[in-house]
Amino acid sequence: MEKQNCQCLGGTCKFIITLGKCQCLCQDFFFGESCSFGKNDTAPHIDPEELPTRKANFSLEIQVNFQLAFKDLSSPQSLEFIKTLELQIEALCKEADPQTFKKVQVINLSPGSVVAKSMAEYIYPNNESQIQFVNTLLDGRLTNILNDTKNLMTISNAFNAVVQLKEITFQPPEIKNITDIKPFVNCSQFTNYTAEIVNGKWQCVGPCKTNTDYCHQHGECYNDISKGPICRCFESSLEQFYGPQCDVSRWGPGFYGALFGSLAVVLLLLIIIIIAVIVKKKQMVVWKRSNSYNRRLSAFEEDFFDFSDTGNHNLGLAGTY
């Protein structure tokens, strides 16, 4: 049952017997438990069948007898002749640019020995430098390859006849630079992804990259390929952020712990200071009382034990004559 409910948006689902559950194997671009998150940059979908191509038309003269059956390209004689020729020229045309080569096709057989008119097609890749190569350098490279004596000899051996290049022409470029590919770029398979040129080629850019402040710097942004950007808000013991875009915050338990702890320390210090002041005042009162008593006692002792003669006292003795 779990295997049937397994959903992997950007990957394949594999049931792990030892774990008793499904596990998603994500493709390169995707990540997450159900492969539902996408990286910031990924290649767009571009249908090569919709893109214009750069076409080269060339004619080869093959010095063999022309058969009436060659006028019908669907005849067995024509099909056999074309198959042999295309096998030879396909390798040569692909050599001119293997990355952009699409196909080669013999489109007509006409008398004059046998003149085989052919067309080679090259796609326009999602790359500025390769586009410029197809537009500016492909002409000379393909012409040199088809004119090369060694290559012509290879074709000659296949037909046991002399082969010559009669003419070669290139159609004007339909794609002049990377911006001309934009109508063919499709990012709709990823929610809120937009097409942008990155390092000379089109990329589907995720909303987390185009809107760097989506989570207000208080969370990590993820490109959900089916829902759009989502935020995983930061949380710490001091502060916690929440909300769809982490734009709301509240104090965490650590903050209140620190606050009440600080208040407790301040209160303790205040109590200590009050006690110290009270003790100090009591000590001052005792000291003052003791000092006053000592002064009174000292004065009494001085008065009581002072026998110094302060005047002429007559003790009833006869006077002197």
Image (cartoon, rainbow, N blue to C red):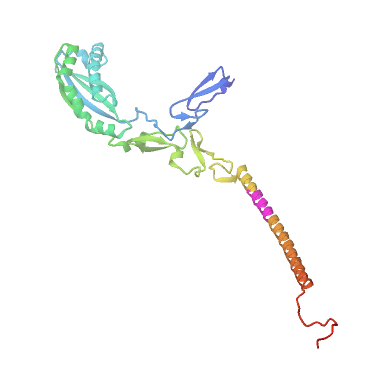
Q: Is 157 drawn above or below residue 6 in the view shown?
A: above
Q: Return the residue nearer the eye: 140 or 113.
A: 140
Quarter of the figure with the N terminus: top right
- Give the side of residue 131 with respect to residue 144, left or right: right
Residue located at (16% from left, 21% from top)? 148
Q: Is residue 126 above or below residue 254?
A: above
Q: Looking at the image, which residue is at 23% across and 27% down?
A: 56
Which corner quadrant of the image does residue 210 belong to? top left
Q: Please, is residue 70 above or below residue 45 in the view?
A: above
Q: Is residue 266 part of the magenta span, yes or no?
A: yes
The quarter holding residue 243 reads top right
In the image, farthest residue toward the front: 321
Position in image of residue 300 (x %, y %): 78, 70
Q: Report x, y in % for residue 45.
A: 39, 30
Q: Quadrant of the C terminus?
A: bottom right
Write the start and end of the magenta stretch as one range.
Answer: 262-273
x and y percentages locating residue 276 in the rendered image: 69, 56
Residue 201 at x, y percent in the picture: 34, 35
Position of residue 258 in the picture relative to residue 56 (left or right): right
Name the magenta segment's main secondary structure.
helix
Considering every residue shown, the one lying at the far right of the view is 316
